[in-house]
Amino acid sequence: MYKRQIRDYADNFIKQNGKWYEQHYIAKFDLSNPDIDWKEDGAEQTINTLRWFSSVNIQNINESQSKDTLSNYFSINNAGYNYDTVGYNIERAKVRVRLPIDISTPEQVKAFWQEKAKILTPYIYYVLSEPVLVECTKEQVEVLDQLSQIRFYRGANNIFTTEDIALLQAEYGVDIKTYIDNRLANINAQILDIVGGN
């Protein structure tokens, strides 16, 4: 049986009870959040790395997906497994990171993440246990109402945006007239082939 992975989830827009919502399946944990206190894990120390854990729990994480996360800073999810490599993992809703051994105090860990955030905020992306609904703004509702009036009849139709927003769910509508006309033309062609007409 196929187990869904983080790449199988997509945020989208849905309409419920006449209202538009952003439906989020993915959340992000900001490693540079100044409210996080980092504590040395006390786990295996190696020649190259020390392991730290966050004082802040990840909220609403799907525990069955905790191994299937992504990060824009770490290339691999492995802080508990490969002891000589910088990495991260999530255990019981706590983020654990393995950093170079010269980062040896909680203050240095916090400063390390603050410095990284000057270039690119370091995140860990994870699957939520339940999707979060956020009511759309008036501007979003206007656009979504316009988009929901668009009709597509053939093939795959993708709507892309350059904005950092969720995807739109669309329903497929069948063009009955075109379908019937095409079927009749096909049947007529078959009859003409059988009777030898043009």
Image (cartoon, helix red, strand yellow):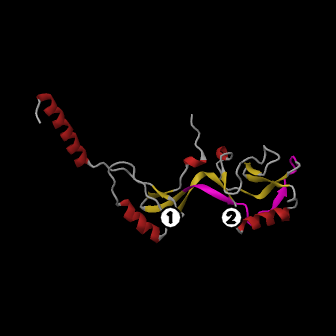
Q: Is residue 148 left or right of residue 140?
A: left
Q: Position of residue 4 (x, y in %)?
A: 58, 42
Quarter of the figure that contains the C terminus: top left
Check disc 2 and give the amino acid type: Thr
User: Which residue carries the number 2 mark?
Assistant: 121
User: Which residue carries the number 1 mark?
Assistant: 162
Q: Is residue 144 visible?
A: yes
| Secondary structure found at label 2 | loop
**Magenta stretch holds residue 114:** no
Say which mark, if any, is on residue 191: none
Q: Which residues are magenta?
A: 24-45
Q: Is residue 34 visible?
A: no
Dots 1 and 2: beta carbons under 8 Å?
A: no
Quarter of the figure that contains the N terminus: top right
* Residue at the outermost bottom position: 138
Mark found first going from the N terminus, 1 or 2: 2
In this rendered view, identify the residue nearer to me: 130 or 169: 169
Name above or below for residue 80 compared with residue 37. Answer: above
Numbered label tally:
2
Name above or below for residue 197 compared with residue 126. Answer: above
| Secondary structure found at label 1 | loop
- Residue at image position (68%, 64%) is 121
Q: CA distance from mark 1 to mark 2?
A: 20 Å
Q: Is residue 127 left or right of residue 138?
A: right
Check disc 1 and give the amino acid type: Thr
Q: Position of residue 103 (x, y in %)?
A: 85, 59
Are there few (<14), some (14-19), or many (20+) residues within 10 Å of tag 2? some
